[in-house]
Amino acid sequence: MTMLCLKAASLLSAKPFYLHFPVPKHQLNPFFSSFKPKKPYSASASRSQIRMSSSSTPPQTIEHIVLFKVKENTDPTQINTMIHSLNRLISLDSVLHLTAGALYRTKSSPIPFTHMLHSRYSSKENLSAYALHPTHVQVVKESVLPICDDIMAVDWVTGDLNGGDSLVPPSGSAIRLTFLKLKEGLGDEVKDEILGVIQGIKDTFGGIDHISCGENFSPARAKGYSIASLAVFRGLSELEAVDSEKELANLEKAKVRDYLESVMVLDYVVSSSRV
């Protein structure tokens, strides 16, 4: 389960507490599955730029996504307290960016998640510092675990943001999250090909501010999903425009479909009042 619960776990068990279904081809989200890389993708370039590696070339950003399934019939006051408490974690020194709130829409998911948290860090060490911080542990124990049925987390390194305005999506931005569960036995070249497909999306459609993607480095907490991407649109209208383009459905089916066991697609809108 999730790094969000890394420290709080000791309260529940002796082991650390960490925070599928096959998707028919016709159900795969066309936003991801209908693209091919703009140019041949180099395995060595991919591993040095976007796949997880201790030798990745800086600057790097660590992406941390946590998905929550709030229990049915939970008091709205408790839900608001959870969201407010999570958003206040932006005050921790190790955090570069953090937003939490209700999902706008679930396009495809085997688990009916209701809320999410997205945060960014300058290193894996800073992500660990966040997870172990007493304030974070208290929020998890008091506001998250009592009202959540299920929690999932995915972490990856991206070298695509380069700081600046891309680091903090502004209020009103729409975020599309895509998590891929690959078939067993696939090698690095296949993963590089998939990451190249994702990176090529930005050049195909307008309205996308930036795309971050990479290979998950916390497999024990991600329910088998190993490739993640996060596309930030200028607004919800830009995201809806991409979904509604008729030619999107008619594009050639990407070869990467043959590699996928399951796809999870979720949309989120960055709130103007996160704390």
Image: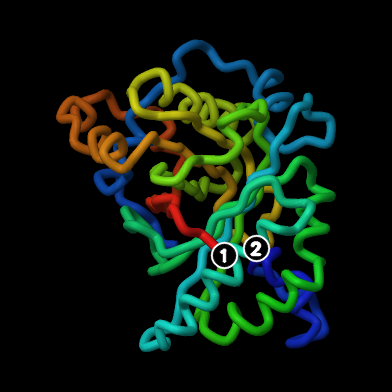
Cα distance between the residues tagged 2 and 1 = 6 Å
**Are the residues flagged by discs 2 and 1 in contact, CB closer than 8 Å?**
yes
Give the residue displayed 72% in from the left and 69% down from the top. Answer: 136
- Looking at the rendering, in which quadrant would you find the N terminus? bottom right
Query: Which residue is more in the foreground, 275 or 224?
Result: 275
Residue 31 lies in quadrant: top left
Give the residue displayed 69% in from the left and 25% down from the top. Answer: 49
- Looking at the rendering, in which quadrant would you find the C terminus? bottom right
* Circle on res. 152: 1
Looking at this view, name the residue that lies furthest to the left.
246
Residue 118, percent from left and from top: 57, 53
Give the residue displayed 65% in from the left and 34% down from the top. Answer: 158
Residue 196, percent from left and from top: 52, 24
User: Do we see residue 224 in this rendering?
Assistant: no
Residue ID for mark 2: 221
Looking at the rendered structure, the secondary structure element under dot 2 is helix
Give the residue displayed 75% in from the left and 79% down from the top. Answer: 9
Looking at the rendered structure, the secondary structure element under dot 1 is strand
Residue 225, percent from left and from top: 55, 53
